Image (cartoon, rainbow, N blue to C red):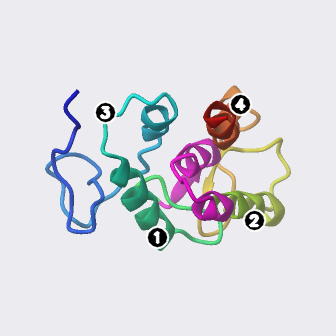
Amino acid sequence: MEKIERERFSDGRLPIAFGAGEDTYSLKYNLAFDKILGLDIFAPDLYESETKYYASVATKYGTPLDSRLRTTKADWLLWCAALDEKGDYAQEVISQVRNFLSDGAERYPFPDWYDVDSAAAKEFRNRTVAGGLFMPLLKDKLKK
């Protein structure tokens, strides 16, 4: 199968959408399924270049969903963490989500959508998508 290699920036990452400028990005969380299921649709070095960039724009509470917003989703962060082979990026992301849960003023049952600068929770609370938080564990389980 031909690998999808349409348009990468000089640092190897993908834009928010094909044709968008170099100052754009978005969490490519669905790459986790390509990796975990071994579909090999995308080149393996894309996982590393994407997570390296996410780490470079992350705050204490995580990487924004994309270049337009200052919010993120905990499940999407952990899906991206599953792209990491070495474990350093995954540990960093887990720490960021832990910081959000510890520092956030709201005491809702695990709000998964929040502001990366203030740790203020948004409207999503106690949702089933939180199962995505276990993506790194699924990756590790399937590797064995």
Q: Position of residue 92 (x, y in %)?
A: 65, 65
Query: What amino acid is found at the position of numbered circle 3 in the picture?
Result: Ile
Q: Return the residue at label 4.
A: 127
Lower sequence index among marks 4 and 3: 3
| Separation of residues labelled 1 and 3 (CA atoms) | 26 Å
Residue denoted by label 3: 41
* Amino acid type at image mark 1: Val
Q: What residue type is labelled 4?
A: Arg
Question: Secondary structure beneath disc 4?
Answer: loop
Closest to the camera, between mark 3 and mark 2, is 3
The residue mark sitting in front, 1 or 4, is 1
Q: Which of 131 and 69 is in front in this view?
A: 131
Q: Which residue is tagged 1?
A: 57
C-alpha separation, residue under disc 1 versus residue under disc 4: 26 Å
Q: Which residue is drawn at 44% across and 30% down?
A: 38
Give the magenta range.
70-92
Is 50 left or right of 12, judged from the image as shown? right
Query: Relative to residue 23, is residue 19 drawn left or right?
Result: left
